Image (cartoon, rainbow, N blue to C red):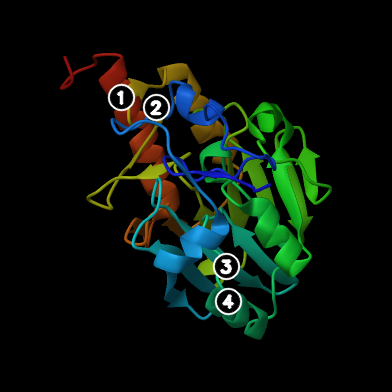
Amino acid sequence: MAFYICTACGTQHAESDEPPTQCMICEEERQYIPSRGQTWTTLEALRQNHTNTFREYDKAIIGIGSTPPFAIGQRALLLRTENGNVLWDCIATLDDATVTMIEGLGGVDAIAISHPHFYTTMVEWARTFAARIHLHAADKQWIMRNDPAIELWDGESKTLWAGVTLVRCGGHFEGGAVLHWTAGAGGRGVICSGDILTVATDRKWLSFMRSYPNFIPLSARTVDKIGAALKPFAFETIYGHYFDRVIAKDGKAVLEASVARYVAAVEGKRGYE
């Protein structure tokens, strides 16, 4: 028996004698099955040829990503807040060096994940650090490995503790969420966005999609709702889902301008006919 991991999206599935016949997440239009077909690995096998790389953005925010990149290739964030450590989003690779590093920084008190593409081996992380996993209930159908550590939240926001809030934006997934940390960026505020708000390659703009690999855009109405969900929150810095996808300053203004630009483009307004 093994907990098989999809090599295309990195999602760990429930224990089974044989690899699953398909990955439901990759079969759905927001992901894809590679041309090689559906293949599987395990965490034990992954540890043989992948390690993790770390980047300290500041003393309180550390990026963690698999080397070489695995599956979608996102990196997670360890946020060292005043009231506890949060692992934001998740990656499939979890090795001894990563555990030692994180334990030395105080462990993990909570795991929060933006959307199902980044669930990966979340149960392994939760069990290793005795942490709770916070997922939006709207996306519960995409949980491929259930565990008592998973706590579903509903509604438009959830406060993990003072100054750390999960905000439902929707869009890419119905329960798509971002994390707002009031004390981040020297008290000017931080948003950890996954790819619910995608930091563009130029790191000057954000964009929004239903499916990134299959190029399915969101409607103007949906993107307006994303902007509205974050209107009450002040923030300076936005951390996207790759190591280099960070908007360091004026994050709130960038979001507002990006929503306006996106809506103009999909509605064919002046300059985007």
User: On the image, numbered disc 2 is attached to which residue?
Assistant: 211
Q: Quadrant of the C terminus?
A: top left
Give me the disc on residue 78: 3
Callouts 4 and 1 close, C-beta under 8 Å = no
* Gap between marks 2 and 1 measured at Cα: 6 Å
Judged by depth in the image, the label closer to the viewer, 4 or 3, is 4
Of the residues under marks 4 and 1, which one precedes in the sequence?
A: 4
Above or below, 173 relative to 231: above
Q: Count the marks: how many? A: 4
* Gap between marks 2 and 3 measured at Cα: 26 Å
Judged by depth in the image, the label closer to the viewer, 4 or 2, is 4
Q: Could you tell me the amino acid type at mark 1?
A: Phe
Under circle 4, the secondary element is helix
Residue 130 appears at what percent x and percent y? 79, 65
Judged by depth in the image, the label closer to the viewer, 4 or 1, is 4
User: On the image, numbered disc 4 is attached to which residue?
Assistant: 96
Residue 215 appears at what percent x and percent y? 30, 24
* Gap between marks 4 and 2 measured at Cα: 34 Å
Q: Is residue 226 left or right of residue 241?
A: right
Under circle 1, the secondary element is loop
**237 or 95: nearer the viewer:** 95
Q: Could you tell me the amino acid type at mark 2?
A: Ser
**265 or 43: nearer the viewer:** 43
- The residue at 52%/27% (across/down) is 22
- The residue at 75%/71% (across/down) is 83
Callouts 4 and 3 close, C-beta under 8 Å = no
Residue 22: in sight, yes or no? yes
Above or below, 251 relative to 171: below
Under circle 2, the secondary element is strand
Dividing the picture into quarters, in which one does residue 246 lie?
bottom left
Q: Could you tell me the amino acid type at mark 3?
A: Leu
